[in-house]
Amino acid sequence: QVQLVESGGGLVQAGGSLRLSCAASGRTFSSYVMGWFRQAPGKEREFVARISWSGGTTVYADSAKGRFTCSRDKSKNTVYLQMNSLKPEDTAVYYCAAKGLGVGPYDYWGQGTQVTVSS
């Protein structure tokens, strides 16, 4: 059974940094893409970043470019989202997700971790 467990959220002042972690278990993820999404109160869930597990290729939403960095540690089966220069509008529940390569929906989701950025 696939499990994705996020951690690292919290309260931070604007301009600060947080690093989110997503521990993955239950299968081999070598052919998977790991994504980060977020959902703010009253808003739809939105894409933040993704990384291919095997090659480490990353893609970022415009809102994340230059501030967020997605990485993975194969030895720990963990994906990270380093978030710098945080803004109040980054406040949301952040979710980790996984899907196979190519077109298709994300099949597996974590429970989410709250990030709150105060002004």
Image (tube, grey):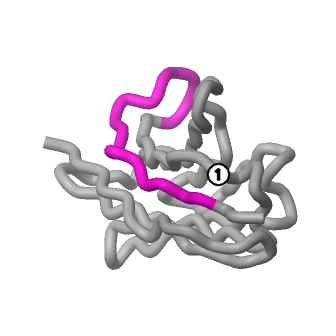
Q: Amino acid at mark 1?
A: Thr
Q: Is residue 2 above or below residue 46?
A: below
Q: Position of residue 21 (x, y in %)?
A: 44, 67
Tell me: residue 7, above or below residue 43. Answer: below
On the picture, is 64 further left or further right than 69? right
Q: Which residue is mark 1?
A: 91
Q: Please give the name of the residue rendered at 79% of the width and 60% of the height, measured from the top-left corner.
A: 87
For residue 110, what is the image quadrant? top left
Q: Nearer the viewer, residue 53 or 93?
A: 93
The part of the chain drawn in magenta is 101-116
Quadrant including the C terminus: bottom right
- Tag 1's secondary structure? loop
Question: Residue lying furthest left in this view?
Answer: 1
Residue nearest the viewer, comparing 47 with 42: 42
Quarter in which the N terminus is drawn: top left
Question: Quick check: 70 above or below 75?
Answer: above
Q: What's the residue at 30%, 56% (across, down)?
A: 5
Q: Position of residue 53 (x, y in %)?
A: 48, 57
In front of the other: 43 or 48: 43
Reply yes or no: does residue 103 show up in magenta: yes
